Image (cartoon, helix red, strand yellow):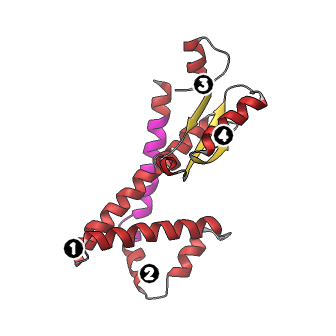
Amino acid sequence: ISTEKLCSSLNIANSVRIMPNTPGQLGEGVSVWFSKNSIKNEVKLTIETILDSLGDHIKVDNEDIIDKATAISGSGPGYIYYFMEVMQKTCREIGIGDELSKDLIAKTFLGSSILANSSNKEFSDLKKEVTSPNGTTEAALNIMKKNNFEETIISGINAAYNRAKELNND
């Protein structure tokens, strides 16, 4: 619900809108937040203290970014879990048990995320570092490209963003 709708519905002057994500359950999330009007420093500090318990937080100056962030960080864990689910299904098909595959997949995502977060390199550069010419990663990426993996991701994120805008306007 937009801050404008919330304020008019409740007959209040100001409201804050926050988009957290599920890793916040462990203090590893990211929340994006917006305030309709300026807020007192003590209120800002209270909001930040609450959001600190969920992980990182980013205040934005444009409420539309909340809908965009919903499509990336709000829905993003679902995309990642889906990718992990498909990877685990494939592990079963090639003969890797569920316990080992879950460990391999989860730690691969975790380590890759930590590396990406701590690096100044672009994601494309990090991808190049693991992609040897004529190697296994290149073989997999070529098939993913051939099967429009990029377009699938783009279309999915755009669908999430459009749905967030629709829900905001309901």
Amino acid type at mark 1 = Glu
- Badges 1 and 3: C-beta atoms under 8 Å apart? no
Res. 93 mark: 1
The residue singled out by tag 2 in the image is 138
* Magenta region includes residue 153: yes
Which of 72 and 52 lies nearest the eye of the viewer? 52
Q: Which quadrant does the C terminus fall into?
A: top left
Instruction: Give the number of the mark in front: 3 or 2.
Output: 3
Which one is earlier in the sequence, the residue at label 1 or at label 3?
A: 3
Q: Determine the CA span between mark 3 and mark 2.
A: 46 Å
| Secondary structure of the residue carrying numbered label 4 | helix
Q: Is residue 155 visible?
A: no
Amino acid type at mark 4 = Thr
Main SS category, magenta section: helix
Magenta stretch, residue numbers: 144-164
The residue singled out by tag 3 in the image is 3
- Give the image location of residue 125, x and y in percent: 60, 74
Along the horizontal axis of the image, is 73 left or right of 78? Answer: right
Q: Quadrant of residue 18?
A: top right
Along the horizontal axis of the image, is 153 left or right of 2? Answer: left
Q: Determine the CA span between mark 1 and mark 3.
A: 48 Å
Res. 49 mark: 4
Amino acid type at mark 2 = Glu
| Secondary structure of the residue carrying numbered label 1 | helix
- Picture layout, residue 84 above or below residue 26: below
Which one is earlier in the sequence, the residue at label 3 or at label 2?
A: 3
Q: Determine the CA span between mark 4 and mark 3.
A: 21 Å
Which one is earlier in the sequence, the residue at label 1 or at label 4?
A: 4
Q: Residue at x 43, y 56 (%)?
A: 153
